[in-house]
Amino acid sequence: MASTDSSTNKISIGLLGFGTVGSNVYNLIKDQGLEIAQATGASIEIKKILVRDIAVPRQDAPPEIFTDNFEDILDDPDISIVIELIGGLEPAFDYITSSLENGKAVVTANKQLLSQRGFHLFKLAREKNTQIKFEASVAGAIPVIKVLRESMVAADLTSVYGIVNGTTNYILSEMSRTGAKYRDALANAQEWGYAESDPTEDITGKDAAAKMAILASIAFHTAVSLDDVACIGIEHVSSTDISYARNLDLTIKLLGVAKLYGNKINVRVYPALIKKDHPLATVSGAYNAVFLKGNSIDEIMLSGPGAGGIETASAVVSDLVSIIVRREPGAHENVAAWREMEFYPDDEVISKFYLRLEVKDEPGVLATIAKVFGDHNVSVESVIQKDSGAHAELVMVFHAVREASFRAALEKIAELSEVKSQPWPIRVEGNGNEQQ
């Protein structure tokens, strides 16, 4: 737990990492020190900062507070809170574990670590009567974790879904706004700092999957790990799909979806087409938005910046203030898996789909394809056919169907000699299927 010196009422902090987020956290604490003191009744100092190389000049902080030895932070009795911003599984896991074992409170933004080993750390924090906060691990500056842990205790939640990755939302927004191809939109996102030089975690959906594992665990009080979350990224979304979506009065977003089916849970990440009048359709750029739906609250939406160093730093400082104000751990610190829930199979989910196919431009092709779908009890809602030189392009939207049936039909479609492209379906949300 956070401890204070009774004579000076000063709290000392150890900061692990001084990259974009770490330096922003340092500057926020320095620049907003008076406001933080007024809110907490304590003055705060970052006493030590762990970096890989202390020889690298850094203008933001005095050189004497940097160290490359974690023990300088762990063994310092004055440091009562550790902020972990180095990312990755190791050595972050060891650092957080050691901090908690020594009774220090922890703030972290490490979604990958929490989604894979979080419940071990939550259990350890309870055993050591200290706190671990992680608001910055999901949705940037949006306080969705605080809302789930505190405000939604009696909401009887049934689903949590939305846009939880700012990078992919920026890319898809740019493709929709300008007609840019995927690669060009990605390069633009990297140029503006919304995407890493290696964007794999974001574009494959793994970043969003880690966040959904955390949100689902809190919302439904059951252990959900990263491995439990199936994810599909945006690599195969093309500017052509964006154009067809516009003609259908739809837009494409990468969604994270966690939903209860009776006493079972299903958690996934995938690109989805949504109606342009849906609130999520207007969430553009690097913004995030999360819907919370429950039997006691109907539905509420939380929205705000989801990517950026200063936004993440703001969430870190918010957690820091929460630790100091609370002083002693309470029920809201518990992220307990007090119930075990089975996972609802993806194959059993009822969904609508959009599908674009390149096919031979010859008589009977559409009838052949429609028959395959009919044989698998997949009903076509609408078809657009467009000639394209030697080939034709079919765009099909289907009625809601059991996903196993649709996938089985796709396997047969892919084997047809008339089909010249790999089928890449996109789910259609908000039209009477599982989300609504």
Image: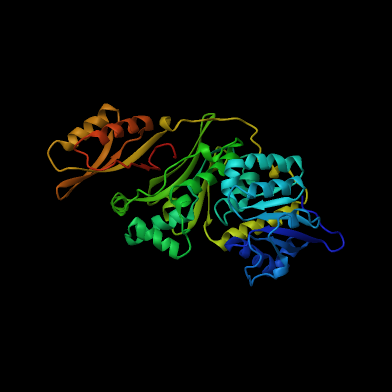
**Figure check: 349 above or below 319:** above
**Residue in the image at 43% along x and 58% along y:** 170
Image point 78% across, 54% down: which residue? 75
Q: Is residue 249 left or right of residue 123?
A: left
Depth order, front residue of 7/150: 7
User: Looking at this view, is 416 or 344 the one in front?
Assistant: 416
Q: How is the image coloured?
A: rainbow
Q: Nearer the viewer, residue 28 or 428?
A: 28
Whether residue 153 is visible: no
- Residue drawn at the location 50% of the way across and 54% of the way down: 288
103 on left or right of 254: right
Horizontal and vertical percent for residue 162? Answer: 48, 47
Which quadrant of the view contains residue 168?
Answer: bottom left
- Measured from the top left, where is residue 124 in percent x and y? 71, 41
Q: Quadrant of residue 128?
A: top right
Q: Is residue 61 above or below residue 322?
A: below
Is 166 placed above or below 31 here? Answer: above
- Residue 194 in picture, x, y percent from top left: 47, 60
